[in-house]
Amino acid sequence: MLVIVVDPADRLERSQWDFYWVPEDVVVHDRPELLYVSCARDLPLLNAVTRIAPAHPDLDGLIADVRRSHAAVRSRWSVPSRVADNRLHDALGRGGYAATNEHDARAVEVEAFAPRPAATCTVVRVTNTNHLRDLVDVGDAAFGHGRRPSDAELEVDLRQCASPKGRVHRFVAYANGRPVSAGGMSVFEDLKFGFLWAGGTVPEAEGRGFYSAVVAARVAWAAARGLQWVGLYARTTTSSPIVQRQGFRRFGAMTYWERGPER
């Protein structure tokens, strides 16, 4: 059946249902009433629920299924405002989950995007290992990731983002030859949508327009791919005001519900 998606919030939500990107050690559990992934590694991104039927008669049973799969790791539910209600919240609470970070669903129409003034810099799309290492350095400085990916992991990441027709693209801004800002975008052709992620700037270069340059580069790439919208889930207390200034409108919200390992 053909599904026509118009609402930007719907595009955002549906983009989270496509797990094409997950590593080989991740299991995708896809049922009509529930969609989630599980992995032995203790990473919430790889042990996450992204779709549930909120009217399902046995929410407690669905949550118990997830708890069994995530028993030894941190577990996360992404709950968009469209499906959030007291019944689901109460069931998650009974399952040991608690609401944590709230995000705004923000998006901008590609044709309507007006780039903000940006600092003098060069933004490149990641196509080689040097670019990718520079991107990792920016992420470490901006977010404090700490763990460095192995050469094998970098090789996998590069295969994903090097092709101009690929589904994952990463961008790095350089000022005076030094990497200062970076960001990624996943392409969903069927939704005509680009999902933005991991945008950040090294602390000493913040507030100078480098992030604006990376946003503009990603939107330009989305336009070249024929996408209609780009968007992201922006944390309400941090990144949401920043992307609002970039022209991204709010189309609802999404909250993480999380719990720690059970054993």
Image (cartoon, rainbow, N blue to C red):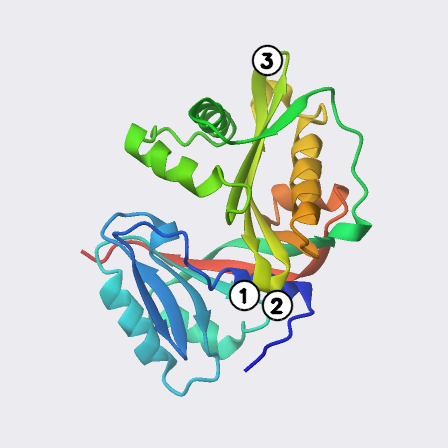
Q: Quadrant of the N terminus?
A: bottom right
Q: Are marks 3 and 1 in contact (CB under 8 Å)?
A: no
Task: Judge by depth and name the residue closer to the eye, 174 or 69.
Answer: 174
Q: Quadrant of residue 204?
A: top right
| Residue at the far left in the pictured view | 263
The type of residue carrying mark 1 is Arg
Q: Nearer the viewer, mark 3 or mark 2?
A: 3
Picture layout, residue 139 above or below residue 237: above
Q: What residue lies at 48% left-to-right and 32% top-to-bottom?
A: 143
| Residue at the far bottom in the pictured view | 57
Alpha carbons under labels 1 and 2: distance apart: 6 Å
Left or right relative to 215: residue 195: left
Q: Residues within 10 Å of mark 2 (few under 14, many from 20)?
A: some
Residue 32: percent from the left, percent from the top? 41, 79
Alpha carbons under labels 3 and 2: distance apart: 40 Å
Find numbered disc 3 in the image and state the secondary structure of the residue it sits on.
Answer: loop
Alpha carbons under labels 3 and 1: distance apart: 38 Å
Q: What residue lies at 64% left-to-right and 75% top-to-bottom?
A: 4
Picture layout, residue 241 above or below residue 6: above
Q: Residues within 10 Å of mark 3 (few under 14, many from 20)?
A: few
| Residue at the far top in the pictured view | 176
Task: Judge by depth and name the residue closer to the eye, 242 or 31.
Answer: 31
What is the number of callouts on the image? 3
Q: Which mark is residue 177?
A: 3
The type of residue carrying mark 3 is Gly
Picture layout, residue 54 above or below residue 24: below
Q: Which mark is residue 14?
A: 1
Task: Say whether disc 3 or disc 1 marks the residue closer to the N-terminus.
Answer: 1
